[in-house]
Amino acid sequence: MLANRWLSGTTLTALGLLVGVPLCFVALQAVFPTLAQGSLANPFGAVVPTLSDPVLVELTVNTLRLGATVVLLAALIGIPLGMLRGLYRLPGAPVWDLLMLVPFMIPPYIAAMGWIMLLQPNGYLQQLVGVNFGRLLFSFPGVAFVMTLNVFPVVYFAVSRGTSAAAARLAEVGRVCGGSAWQCFVRITLPLAAPGIAASLLLVFAMAIEEYGTPAALASNAGFFVLVTGIERRFSEWPIDLPGAAILSLILVTLAMAAFFGQRWLLATRSFETATGKPAESAPRELGRWRWPVLGLFGATVLVSVVAPLFAIAATAFSRTLSGGLVADNLSLTHFSAIAASGSEAGRALGTSLSLGLGAALVTGVLGALVSYLVVMSRARGRGLLDAMSLLPNTMPGVVVAVGLILAWNQPALAVTPYNTWAILLLAYCCLLLPYPVRYANAALRQVGPSLEAAARVHGARAAVALWRVLLPVIAPSLIASMLLVFAVASRELVASLLLASTGTQTVSVFIWRQFEQGSLGQGMAMSLVTIAVTTTLMVAATVWLQRRG
C-alpha cells in the first residue's frame, strides 16, 4: 500500500508538471494580463477588450465553420468507403487499408504545400494537362478540401471496423427474417455503427479546429483566419499580446473539450449492444457486378488523397529547379545530397527530431504504463484524477500547450528553466502525446484483469516486481506500438516546435517550414519525403505488430 501511494504521488507530480502547469498558466495569463512581468495587477483587465474585439467573433465563426465543413466532407468520403470495406469482400483489402493510412501520415502542412505545387498557376497539373485550380485552392473550399484529405481515414477505419463484425452478421439474420437490404442497413447496420461514426466525426472536428499548418499555408492567402492562426499571430506580430493569446487559447480548449466530452457522452449513452455475447465472425458479402465500380471508387480516392500530393512532393524534391519543369533533364538528387551532407542544417534538424521523438516515446511510455497500472490495477487514492489528467491533453491543441509552456517557464523569478532549450520541446511533445500510451496500456491491462498480479503477490512478489516481471511483459506489445506512434508524430510536430524552438535548436518540421518560407522548396520537399517515409514505416510497423499480437 505504501509503495502504491509513493508511486501514485510521483506519477501525479509528473502529470502536474507535464499537463497541469501549461493549462494553469494559460488560465492565469488570461486572468492577470501582467503575469509575464511577475505581477498580478489588474485582474481580468484583458478579458473585456479581447472578447469585445470583432475579430474574435470572426475567428471563432471561421473555426467552427471550417470544423463543420471538414466533418461533413469527411463523412461523405469516409462513411461510404468504410461501409463497403466492412460489409463486402473487397479485393486487396489490406493494401487499400495501408493506402488509406498514408494521408493521415502526411503532415498537413506538407500536404498543403504539395497541393500548392500541383494546383497553382503553372503548377504540375497545368504543365501536364493545361489547367490550374489556384483560385479554388486558395479559398475556403480549397482549405476544407485539403484538410479533409488528411483526416477522412479516421472515419474510414472507424466505420470499417465497426461494421465488419456483429453489424454484418446481424444484418444477414435480418435478411433471413424477411427484411430488405435497405431495411436491414437502416435498422440494424447503421445503428450498430452509429456510435463509432459519431465518435470519429467528433474527433475529426477536434483535429480540424486544432490544425495550424493547412490554414497557415492556404487560408491566409484567402484572407481566412481561424483561432489557431490568430493565437500564433499574437505571438509573432508586434506588439506581442500574451493575454489575448491566452484568452483565445482558452476558447479553443473549450471547443475541443466540447467535442471530446460530446464523443464520450455519445459512446456512453448512445451505444447498441448485442445480446449474444462475443460476435461470431461473418463472411463478408460478395460485390458481384459492383466489383469494378467499387474498386474504381477506392482507386479514385487513393489517386486524389495519396498519389496527387505525393507526386507533387516527389516532383519538387527531385527537380533541380522549379523553373525547369517536369522534364527528364531537370531530375536531380541535389536536394537529397544537401540533406545528407555531413554537418548540414537539415542533418542536424533530423537528428534533433529523431532524438526528441525517441525521448518523448520513452517518457510517455513509462508514464503511460504507470498511469494505466494505477488506474486499472490498483486501488490507490486519486485514480480518477490521474485518469482525467492523462486524458486532458486530448483537449489541448498544440498551440495551447506551447502558449502554456512559454508562460510557465519564461517567468523572471525562475533561476533554472528549460525555456530556450531542447527540453521545452520534449515537455511539449510528452504533454501532447501522453494519451497514446495511456489508452493502449489501459486497453491491454483491462484484457489481462487482476488475476495475474494477484497470483504474483500471493507467491511473495512485491508490487514493483509484479509490475515489472508479470504485467509489463504482457502489455509490452501494445505499449511499444503506442511508443512508435509517439515517436512518429513527435518527429514531425509543427506548431509547438515553431513557437518553442530556440534560435540554436531546429527540428525537421521547423526546417521544412522555414525552407518553404524562404522559397527553398526543393530541400523542404526532400526533407518532407524523408519524414513521410519514416513516419509511415513506423505506423505500418505498429499496425502489423498489433495485428500479430492481437
Image (cartoon, grey):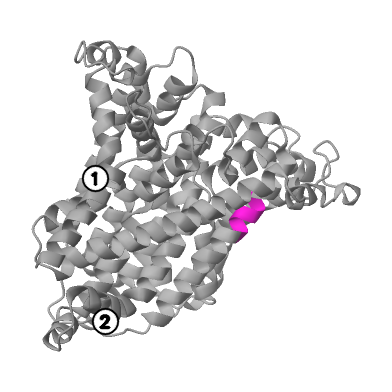
Is residue 331 inside the magenta stretch? no
Residue 43 as seen in the image, left or right of residue 83: left
Q: Residue at x 43, y 54 (%)?
A: 360
Of labels 2 and 1, earlier in sequence is: 1
- Residue 253 in the image: x percent, y percent? 28, 36
How many labels were placed on the picture? 2
Residue 441 as seen in the image, left or right of residue 308: left
Q: Is residue 229 above or below residue 200?
A: above
Q: Which image quadrant is residue 53 in? A: top left
Residue 204 as seen in the image, left or right of residue 471: right
Q: Residue at x 42, y 20 (%)?
A: 234
Q: Which image quadrant is residue 463 in? A: bottom left
Part of the protein shown in magenta? 528-533
Which label is found at residue 16?
Answer: 1
The quarter of the picture where the N terminus appears is bottom left
Q: Residue at x 58, y 34 (%)?
A: 137
Q: Which image quadrant is residue 243 in? A: top left
The quarter of the picture where the C terminus appears is bottom left
SS label for mark 2? helix
Disc 1 marks which amino acid?
Gly
Name the residue nearer the viewer: 187 or 238.
Answer: 238
The answer, for residue 270, to whether it is visible in the render is no
Is residue 530 inside the magenta stretch? yes
Residue placed furthest toward the right: 329
The answer, for residue 110, to whether it is visible in the render is yes
Name the residue nearer the viewer: 297 or 353.
Answer: 353
Disc 2 marks which amino acid?
Val
Q: CA distance from mark 2 to mark 1?
A: 28 Å
